[in-house]
Image (spheres, grey):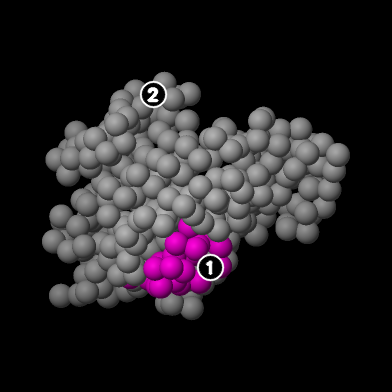
Amino acid sequence: MMKENIVFVFPGQGAQYIGMAHDLFKEYAVVRHTFEEVCDISHKNITQACFNGPQEILNKPEFTSLGTLAHSVSIARIIESYFNAPLYKIAYAVTGHSMGQYSALHCAGSLSFEDTVKLLSARSTYMSMTSAEGGGMACIVGLDKDAVEMCLMAATGRGFASISNHNAKDQFTISGQSDALDAVIERAKEKGAKIAKKLNVSVPAHCALMENAKILLNHRLESINLVSPKTRWFSNQSAQILSDPQDVKSALIGQMTQGVRWLDIMEKFPEHNITSAYELGPGRTLTGLINRAKVGVVARKTNSLTNVINMLTCLSQSIKR
């Protein structure tokens, strides 16, 4: 269907902001319907949180996850309506960052929308229930992996901390207990990091502190009907394309305690002759990471009505006639 190989990428927690998707909500009935579905299934006013906040409510894991899902799937549905085809027929591949993996799996035809909403809601609850007191995440930019691992040694005697996301050659996310994160941040600044700061995240995701959440999610996934993705889906943990439903479930479970290998995923794109990427959802973090990675892929954001319209124009030029 497409002249080029396109990957759709889905953002995770941290991309949210008050007002996200509001312009799309006013313009498209399919967006209004998507947000209504999420509210009905979750029994939470996700629309209110996304459009009006307050920020402390939107930043709660469940509201963040479900709001980001609603925004991402809304844009996917705009594309599907415009081209009268499911997204997996247009996409050469899909992938997501952290909880964005669930958005990607739904759009790949692997999970029903209802199951996706319920899984993300449960996942957020499990993470909040089992997070260590005072735990969170921090961002370090400007150091290579060896240097970051040396910085982690500063946490000795202060608590637990580990690398949770490897987003670029010099960009990492650290998860752990609060005192340990403070020690790592201080050491990273001494080492010359461009950025070393805590993130506005209330749980230490993707690390050993989420072991109990991992066990709970494993039980929850046993009752979920997950089928093979209908297009290529890159796993966060292995950076490999997975198709077997049980392998996909195992990847979602493993994601709770293992890091996101986003750099490795991006570096796989040239092997598949992927030349364009579209970030479906709020923010532009993944767009920036892909463009800066210099892997021969042009990435575009869709975080506004104007950007969505531009995306539709670009996709139209890629359709085989």
Residue 181 found in image quarter:
top right
Q: Amino acid at mark 1?
A: Ala
SS type, badge 2: loop
Q: Nearer the viewer, residue 294 or 182?
A: 182
Calculate the distance from the C-alpha at mark 1 to the C-alpha at mark 2: 35 Å
Judge from the rendering whether residue 184 lies leftward or rightward of residue 29; answer left or right: right
Picture coordinates of residue 291 (x, y %)? 49, 58
Local crowd size for mark 2, using a 10 Å CA cut-off: few (<14), some (14–19), many (≥20): some
Residue under numbered circle 2 = 53
Q: Amino acid at mark 2?
A: Gly
Q: Earlier in the sequence, mark 1 or mark 2?
A: 2
Residue 318 appears in the figure: no
Residue 149 found in image quarter:
bottom right
Q: Residue at x 45, y 62 (%)?
A: 249
Q: Is residue 38 above or below residue 3?
A: above
Q: Is residue 279 above or below residue 275?
A: above
Q: Is residue 87 above or below residue 128?
A: below
Judge from the rendering whether residue 189 lies leftward or rightward of residue 6; answer left or right: right
Picture coordinates of residue 8 (x, y %)? 36, 60
Residue under numbered circle 1 = 239
The magenta stretch is 231-252
Picture coordinates of residue 73 (x, y %)? 29, 49
